[in-house]
Amino acid sequence: MGSSDDDSSDALRDALADANLPTLLLVLCHLTGDQKWITEPYRPSKGKPLDDNDTAGLPDDLRAEVRSAAYDAVLAYRAGRITPVDPTPEQVTTMLGCALAETVPAEYGALLSEEMGLMSRDVDIPSDSVSEGFRVVIIGAGLSGLCTAIKLARTDIDFVILEKDEDLGGTWLENVYPGCGVDTPSHLYSFSFAPNPKYSRYFAKRNEVEDYLQGLAESYDVRSRIQFQTEVVRARYENDSATWQIETRDATGQRAELSANVLISAVGMVNRPSIPPIPGLADFSGPVMHTAAWDTSVDLTGKRVAVIGNGASAMQLVPAIADDAQRVTVFQRSKQWAVPHPNYHRTVNESVRYLMAEVPFYLQWYRLRSFWNFSDRLHSSLQIDPRWPHPERSVNEANDRHRVFLTKYIKAQLGDRTDLLDACLPDYPPYGKRPLIDNGWYATVSRDDVDLVTDAVERVEGNTVLSSAGAAAEVDVIALATGFKTLQFLWPMEIIGRSGRTLREEWGEDDARAYLGVTVSDFPNFFLVNGPNTNAGHGGSAIHPTEFQVRYILQAIKYLLSNDVASIEVDRDVFVEYNRELDEALAQSIWSHTGMTTYYRNQAGRIVVSSPWTYVDYWTRIRNFDQLEYHSEALQPESAAAV
């Protein structure tokens, strides 16, 4: 054996000392096919909630045995002495259940196998079905736009991405405020077809997510398909040609037009900042920065900073700037439940990154464990139990246990700052708003140099921010952590359908609806990724529904091309019935609770952002395109010509 082989073997042995044992047991079983590794005495014991359970609860001698066996198995795999056989979907649920010390229902088998990459989500579109001149236009080069482009790039379909920014990345390009990062586990923030072994933190900061997206664009060769600094102003469906005529504006204001057979919006929900209409804000003499438009040249050292808002962005920003600023004053709009996560500040050791990059199936199984722990397990505790006697504080017994746990946690974090209890302890059910991960928020607002104001901002006078109750803070910088125009889907674009009505007329200002979250009747050949009611409010990652939706859209495109069909449009009755069922399910969920305000709901009280479905339910609904739910128009000879 050469020195390089010796070095590789030594690196493997050293890395295995830091391996997550439940994950390693799954790797062993997968590599060798030997079921003993998921039976006694090797079966892991139950770990603490959300904990990685690295030791699996096994004694030292068994841990050493597992690592030694894994070392031998990986070397045998590298040498070609063993050929692993991928587990069936049923076996995947059995194996995962063993690692988690709980039962994983068999209905999840195929979904989990897709998440593992054992079953493909690609859509095969025969080259000879792609007519000359057929084009797809994607709006947005963020996460969902890149996913769509990568899947289209596997086909012979001509496509282009129109991106308003100067580079790709979407929210991960635009948001550069201090502390910005994911609030879902890092390894869920990568596509099933391209898991990322490079994350250095279990909850990555934004620069690593941006690096991941940049790497995807390069490795899948889609960057050349992007027109940067090109904003879509208007898109109109033309009945005669069954095409979308798209008007764009570049950075200089110059207008242009292009045509597409299929138009896909991948702009997401967090691409247009919401700026509150605070009197006097425009006259403030110092820097005013929204978290989504942060000016990195502004030095906060020794400055007095007002942070308006206390949602997800503020919860990352405030602890990140408190040490540098002279004083931070937080103007809190509403109280937040924040969940502790043992991995939030934890780095991924270099040895573990080696395992994820070099040991077959290690990253995939680790990612799958995160998927289960951070997604549908919570869903049942967010459903309203009409018999529950304390609806004002929780929606069911499990939700009340979460309330008790989180209340104790908040009190412990505040310590002797009991004067902050009323300001920090929410009076609505846990998870009624978006679940937030505690970044040291409660410890930070307890500091002597941090003030928490619980009244709304009324106005700005000179360099003073005044609240509705008369609290005043003299500041040098104002940071707006006020979120996005999440209810104004696709704003400010004008999308005009078959009948001449715009999407804004169809939806109103804040009541977007779509079938499966991806398509709207009267708007043929138009699809959305991350459209209304596709945000899984119970947890997980935006990555999962994005992949489901992109597959469905490509199936629809395949139907168009393979059946000489010029256009497809979801049946109005199908559209209406789906949204009736969706609203009925949402009415039984925690997000309909009247005890809090949330960006999930519009002014009429309808939930527009959140999905009521479990991941497996939504995956089942959107797994296969059904042409019987759509109206089709045959391709006319004149329409077959190049667009």
Image (spheres, rainbow, N blue to C red):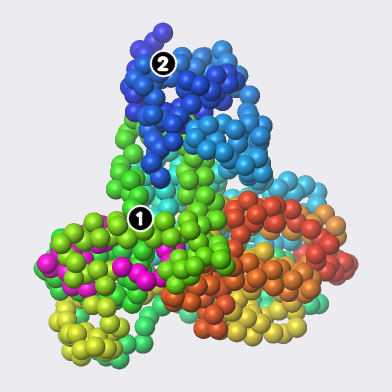
Residue 134 visible somewhere in the drawing = yes
Kind of residue sitting beneath label 1: Phe
**How packed is label 2: few (under 14 Cα within 10 Å), some, or many (20 or more)?**
few
Res. 177 visible in picture: no
Q: Quadrant of the N terminus?
A: top left
Pointer 1 residue? 405
Q: Secondary structure at mark 2?
A: helix
Which residues fall within the magenta stretch?
Answer: 425-452
Q: Which mark is residue 58?
A: none
Q: Image point 42% across, 53% down: which residue?
A: 184
In the picture, measured across the screen, residue 178 lies left or right of residue 555, that is left
Above or below, 331 against 296 in this view is below
Residue at the location (40% across, 45% down)?
50
**Which of the pair 261/576 is nearer the observer?**
576
Residue 166 pos. (x, y %): 43, 65
The first of marks 2 and 1 along the sequence is: 2
Res. 318 image quadrant: bottom left
Q: Quadrant of residue 114?
A: top right
Along the horizontal axis of the image, is 532 left or right of 305? right
- Residue at 17%, 65% (x, y): give it: 417
Locate residue 643, reporting x and y percent: 74, 67
- Mark linked to residue 65: 2
Residue 432 is a magenta residue: yes
Q: Amino acid at mark 2?
A: Glu
Q: Could you tell me which residue is drawn at 79 percent across and 73 percent down?
A: 573
